[in-house]
Image (cartoon, rainbow, N blue to C red):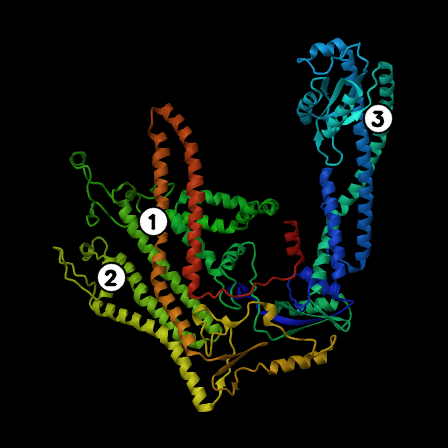
Amino acid sequence: MTSTFRSEEMSFCDMYLHADDAFECVNRLGELGICQFKDMNVNMNAFQRHFVSEIRNLEEMERIIRYFTNELKKDEMKYFDESFQEDQAAMSSSLNDMIAKLESREKELKELGSNFEELEKNHNELIELSNVLNKTTTFFEDGVYDVDVINNQSTRQPIYQPINQSTNQPIRYTAGVMPVNRVFGFTRLLYFATRGASFLRTADIDGQIRDPATGDIVNKCVFMVVCSGQQLHSKIRKIAEGFHATLYPCPDNLPERERMMDGVRQRLIDLEMILDRSREQREQTLRIIARNLKSWKVKVVRLKACYHMLNMFRYERGSFVGQCWLPTSYLARVQNLLNVSNDRASNIINPIPSSSLPTYHKSNSFTMAFQAIIDAYGIATYKEVNPAIFSIITFPFLFSVMFGDAGHGLLMLLFALYLCLNQRSLATAAEKNEIFSIVFGGRYMILLMSLFSIYSGFMYNDVFSRSVAFVPSSWKVVYDEQYLEKYSSSMLDPSNKTVFQNAYPFGIDPVWKSSSNQITFTNSYKKKLSIVFGVAQMLLGIFLGLCNHIYFKKYLNIICDFIPMLLFLLSLFGYLTALIIAKWAIFYEGSSFYDCSPNLLIGFINMFLMSYPAPADDKQCDTIWFTGQKELQITLVVVAVVCAVWLLLGKPLILLAVHKYNTTNSGHQRLVEESPSSPSSRIDFGSDVRNRRSSSLADRDSIDVLNSHGSGNRDVLNSHNSATSGELDGISKSRSDSVVVVVGGDDVHHEKFDFGDIMVHQAIHTIEFCLGCISHTASYLRLWALSLAHAQLSEVLWTMVMRIGLKLGAKWVNSVVIFLTFAPFATLTVVILILMEGLSAFLHTLRLHWVEFNSKFYDGNGLPFDPFCFEKIMKNVEG
């Protein structure tokens, strides 16, 4: 509870590790995942650090692992996700052995791959040659070689002399294989290049050929070109080679082709045997790699992370000296861990003072989503109140006020229950899909939003835009049929006991759905609820600011910020809320004031104008509710004005008076230790120190620990820490007329007192709060606006879609129409009313918490706690 309401108590520590133990200690700290290390070598680049060679070796190992992964994917082989021992996953002593093993496996796999690729290439060439011999034999059998056939099939008269038996030039044959997608271009170019003096035949190769270099399947075909003359034959060969064709010898007599075919068959049989053996050897090697790949990957990632952390340490005299942040509750555990790793007593962790500590909130699967929403606005300043614990209730409740429909909430509930009940099986899918991981991470938030939406839906009596009479209505219709025939509508008077008995026990009476003034009634009701909820949440924020002031001992902020802010809000909008509740309680049916129900808006405006006009109606209803109301309202307006002036001038004038007192009477200026402040206390005694601090942890906590001690001597360390603590004793005085010295841990600031700067900051703060009270109260009316929009969209969808199926045709026709209209009704309900309207309500709720609520107390200028954690690193790597 403490770490949820306020952040964990953090410590800034010096860490001294013996060189022989440093790696093992850092490895164990990574498994614990609770220390955030500070870079002690910010002035050194990556190539000047101690373990640069080890990092380079590990990067080379990462490259080898990527190569193994690609080879496994190429062969469609999955690596085994075997368990491994966490304490053996990173061992610096085996780094050289591991890289040697990986390089050996890489060399072996590359040799096998190159040999297999060469064998597969030869195998493809033999298959292509076999197809060339088979297809060309078919060409010759079809009479392609016949001169008359060639001349008759030529569609144009060639410029060259036709091929005939009287020519002195012999017939030439060019045969080969090329990709099918290149045949068309090859055919056209061949025709124009030879001017029709050649004859081309093609035939697709049976089956598919795999390219050994890329692994892609390539469709190829056999071609054969017949021409006359050596010169033309050479030109055809060059054209074929330009189209990346593979040319093969093709004897023009059948016996020679058959002998060549027999030789090709025998070579194919022998080569296939060699290929099978090579494939088995490669698969065996890949299986060994796949069995160890997960372990190798984890080892390399963890080794690299450890060496990166060690590079943030400073090396001196055989020891590594570093600094880190960690929760104070883990100090003893970390010290024990350092002692357990080795029996040497030189491994030390020692807390030192620091003014800049990161913020760490413990969270679980339930609170994680709410904490993430707050952290998205800003990390809480160290030890200030955490709004996440309150948003667990306020966020889903305000969402439900805008989304209030019990039917839609029920659908959300079913979805949330599915996510919660199957979270173990869905966790793996969430890791692979970023969008689904966001939804899955907020499953408990969706669960609460759905439950609150069901509650609000029953309060509004809205179930898929329909009202449900859980108990009979409190209204009774006493008119007979003759009266209803004469008057199409009639106003029911709640003061008439024969018409209205008493208030509906829960929610809104279902009869309002049938009334013509339903929207007028529900709008008035929801607007008033929005104001009440908004003022209540803003008051909660102001009181949380008081908790911050008390915790940080900012007593001046209590007097000059909290009290005027509270009185200002209560005197205006607190009074308005009281009027709303009083109107509900006093001006009810049957009361003596029922006929004189006042208009709150007009009355609130007249309160500021201090105008109280006489009643203008016949009922002579007085605008004054009770005796002394006029005087009370004037007093509240005066109080609001005084509080605004108080908020503007109180703190600057007090600070000026303190400054003058210290300067005039003692000649010394107060030494103030500054703590993290809330937005309402950014100007403290002296100056706004928080705004002048650096946002970098490395810049804030630059303590040279090496100048005061050696490689782990406890006595020197303790004397150094005692001296440091002596510099930080409470509040002291410095001899200066106009300088404030602020000491906070290791930060020392000398700042001049500037009343103008303080006045400007306080003026901005006053204007923001006073105008914000008005604008933020109006902003809460979005609760009413979104609720109205959701209800009207739901009503339109029911009227335009579902009601058609309920009223159209006879019984059997009506059943078919209901069946047909339900599908679009269900689809539009889920897409528009649940997804789109739900997202809209979620974003508006987010705005109310970030701006209207958090601005009253939340600073949000903290530093996130980012510990060195193997589990987190592995998730990032795998993601």
Q: Which mark is residue 507?
A: 1
Per the image, label 1 sits on a secondary structure element best described as: loop
- The x and y percentages for residue 770 are 35, 66
Residue labelled with disc 3? 268
Residue 323 visible in the shown view: yes
- The x and y percentages for residue 408 are 42, 43
Identify which amino acid the numbered label 3 is placed on: Leu
From the viewer's perspective, tell me whether residue 301 is left or right of residue 796: right
Identify which amino acid the numbered label 2 is placed on: Ile
* Residue at position x 80%, y 9% in the image: 166
Per the image, label 2 sits on a secondary structure element best described as: helix
* Residue at position x 18%, y 61% in the image: 623
The local crowd at label 2, few if under 14, some if 14 to 19, many if 20 or more residues have their Cα within 10 Å, is few
The part of the image, by quadrant, that contains residue 34 is bottom right
Identify which amino acid the numbered label 1 is placed on: Gly
Q: CA distance from mark 3 to mark 1?
A: 86 Å
Q: CA distance from mark 3 to mark 2?
A: 99 Å
Numbered circles on residues, count = 3
- The x and y percentages for residue 167 are 79, 12
> Residue most toward the left?
618
Residue labelled with disc 2? 605
